[in-house]
Image (cartoon, helix red, strand yellow):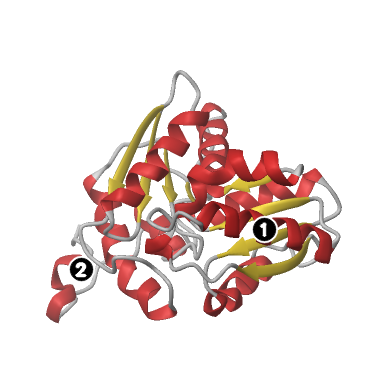
Amino acid sequence: MRIVIINPNTTTAMTAVIDAAARGVARPDAEIVSVTSTMGPASIESHYDEAMAVPGIVDAIEDNPGADGYLLACFGDPGLDAAREVAGAPVLGIAEAAMHLAAPLGRGFSVVTTASRTIGRAADLVEHYGFTRSCRGIHACEIPVLELESNPEAVGIITKMCAEALAADGSDAVVLGCAGMAGFVGDIGAAVGAPVIDGVAAGVGMLTAMAAMGLRTGTRTGEFAPPPPKPYTGLLTPFARPQD
């Protein structure tokens, strides 16, 4: 089976972190293909960034056809519904996947993300995915996404925040709220003594299971059917859906 992981930002160093996390949990029969968006923001830390990342996500899916699953490696799950319309296989977002795996591990989980301005988006996703009862709190460590790898204090800061979140929320697990944190999951889990879930690993696990079961996204005639053909103008002209 072939799983395509899309880094919706344009930072190749982060794609390398994502790829390593994916390969660390992939089944032996799973081919992991990690790609970096060719257009959009260097990091995604705002609603504007998310919107500007969507064309690159669509482009990455169409440049990598025939996969058994696609994973959007940004915790805001940008463009997820649009991706499901254009992909020929299941598409998951890492926030969606991480919450699904965290919920059965105890009474509740905490989310530890990067910047406080992203807390609202994470809360929206918690509600959208039906985890309001399970999510006990969302916390920000105030480390910019692009500093996760360059800041030598990043692991310590995130670990401290995870421990504080577990105690403050009375939760049983922590969801890491950024794909750039994927390489830290082992160290943080060992330090806090509780399950720590990285959405990249969670998404790979879920997609490979779905592929093994032969599952696909709904029907191809309903909401997630391919979008109807129509002309687009300006910079988005290349993204018009082809006529039959």
- Relative image position of residue 214 (x, y in whole percent): 52, 31
Examine the image and state in which quarter residue 130 appears: bottom right
Residue beneath disc 2: 240
Mark 1: amino acid: Lys
Residue at the top extreme of this rendering: 28
Q: Residues within 10 Å of mark 2 (few under 14, many from 20)?
A: some
Label 2 secondary element: loop
Residue at x 33% of width, y 67% of height:
54
Q: Is residue 102 above or below residue 207?
A: below
Marking on residue 160: 1
As helix, strand or loop, the secondary structure at mark 1 comes to: helix
Residue 141, picture quadrant: bottom right
Q: Is residue 228 visible?
A: no
Q: Residue furthest front?
A: 152
Q: Is residue 79 left or right of residue 76?
A: left
Instruction: Residue 97: give its label.
Output: none
| Of the pair 161 and 23, the residue shown nearer to us | 161
Relative height, residue 165 to residue 25 (above, below)? below
Q: The N terminus lies in which quarter of the figure? A: top left
The residue shown at (40%, 53%) is 149
Q: Earlier in the sequence, mark 2 or mark 1?
A: 1
Amino acid type at circle 2 is Ala
Q: The C terminus appears in which quarter of the rendering? A: bottom left
Real-space Cα separation, disc 2 to disc 1, in angstroms: 47 Å
Can the viewer see residue 92?
yes
Q: Position of residue 217 (x, y in %)?
A: 50, 48
Marks 2/1 in contact by CB < 8 Å: the verdict is no
Depth check, mark 2 against mark 1: the one in front is 1
In the rendered view, would you say 170 is above or below 142? above
